[in-house]
Image (cartoon, rainbow, N blue to C red):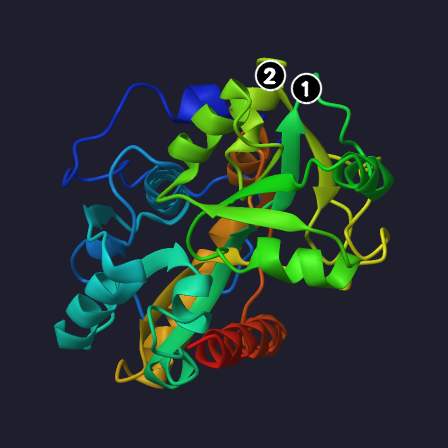
């Protein structure tokens, strides 16, 4: 019988050096021995550029991914954080790197599909190739655990009493509060913040009624300080099967961004195909998927045409956002 896969806690003890090698060239893990060998393999460690700072969800996920890549397939990875500019800093570095397949990007897909400032991102899918998705973001709306704001009807009652709903948002979802108010035909005051930590502080302090979350709700829920009231994804979140989507509540608004691995399209097709195949195999492994679910993420492993279709849907949303910004000028 094959050995029982180790638990996520056993696979990821301690912390990693920022530029240190991840994992070791271990024997193939259970379930990967029969996978087709790639047509290309690296001759040195891969450099995985991450568009978020060290210590956050994206950084942790990139290191987990690199660790599994080493344990399952012997491909070693160096994680290098390149945050800033809504992903533009990483993308510029990736465009100037050697196109031999040894440098890949890791970040949120909205950095390729949503506007950054006044620039639409449509052309980014022409410059980069999304090799694989690793996890879908659990985009949702949360409230304090003691707030009586579980439904749109609750929101309407509060607004009817002369207390408009305050809604905390941060990049790249600043537009959601305004759009939601128009769809529901009620007053929602969108309050922009720089990041989720500021939003969480104001939500728990009572300044905000509701807040947008793409994962920041997880620790608050576990501490019984916040709750998810609506999913903003296309389908109900696996972690919250009883929580309805906004579409079910009558607001035709759905967002499902994801963490992806991508490469410069100047990298040879054969190399990109091998990278895509190997990252997809790792994304399908149970230890990584268990680790994703522990962090409230939605395990996902898309590549090729299915992934491109999802990203093109994001581009359509992104262009709509851009046009709305132009109309307000």
Residue named by callout 1: 145
Give residue 141's quadrant in the image. Answer: top right
> Residue at the location (56% across, 31% down)?
217
Residue named by callout 2: 225
At label 1, counting other C-alpha atoms closer than 10 Å, the crowd grade (few under 14, some 14-19, many 20 or more) is some
User: Measured from the top left, where is residue 205 in percent x and y?
Assistant: 50, 19
- Which secondary structure, mark 1? loop
Q: Is residue 34 left or right of residue 116?
A: right
User: Measured from the top left, where is residue 36 in percent x and y?
Assistant: 51, 64
The answer to whether 36 is drawn above or below residue 134 in the figure is below
Q: Is residue 33 visible from the viewing direction of this image?
A: no
Q: Residue furthest front?
A: 162
> Residue at the location (62% across, 32% down)?
209
> The C terminus is located in which quarter?
bottom left
> Residue at the location (39% across, 31% down)?
197
Calculate the distance from the C-alpha at mark 2 to the C-alpha at mark 1.
5 Å
């Amino acid at each position: 019988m094959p050995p029982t896969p180790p638990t996520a806690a056993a696979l990821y003890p301690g912390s990693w050096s920022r530029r240190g090698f991840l994992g070791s060239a271990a024997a193939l893990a259970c379930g990967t021995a029969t996978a087709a060998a790639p047509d290309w393999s690296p001759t040195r460690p891969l450099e995985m550029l991450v568009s978020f700072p060290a210590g956050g969800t994206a950084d942790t996920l990139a290191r987990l991914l690199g660790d599994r890549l080493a344990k399952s397939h012997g491909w070693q990875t160096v994680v290098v954080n390149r945050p800033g500019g809504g992903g533009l800093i990483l993308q510029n570095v990736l465009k100037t790197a050697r196109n031999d397949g040894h440098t890949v990007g890791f970040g949120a897909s909205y950095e390729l599909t949503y506007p950054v400032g006044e620039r639409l991102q449509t052309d980014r899918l022409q410059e980069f190739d999304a090799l694989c998705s690793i996890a879908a973001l659990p985009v949702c709306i949360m409230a304090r655990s003691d707030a009586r704001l579980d439904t749109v009807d609750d929101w309407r009652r509060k607004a009817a009493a002369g207390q408009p709903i305050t809604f905390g948002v941060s990049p790249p979802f600043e537009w959601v509060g305004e759009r939601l108010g128009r769809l529901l035909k009620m007053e929602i005051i969108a309050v922009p913040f720089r990041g989720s930590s500021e939003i969480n502080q104001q939500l728990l302090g009572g300044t905000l009624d509701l807040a947008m979350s793409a994962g920041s709700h997880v620790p608050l829920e576990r501490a019984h300080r916040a709750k998810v009231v609506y999913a903003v994804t296309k389908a109900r979140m696996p972690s919250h099967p009883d929580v309805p989507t906004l579409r079910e509540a009558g607001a035709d608004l759905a967002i499902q961004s994801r963490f992806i691995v991508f490469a410069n399209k100047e990298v040879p097709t054969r190399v990109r195909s091998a990278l895509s195949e190997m990252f997809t195999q790792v994304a399908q492994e149970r230890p990584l998927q268990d680790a994703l679910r522990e962090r409230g993420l939605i395990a996902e492993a898309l590549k090729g045409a299915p992934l491109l279709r999802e990203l093109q849907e994001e581009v359509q949303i992104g262009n709509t956002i851009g046009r709305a910004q132009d109309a307000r000028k």
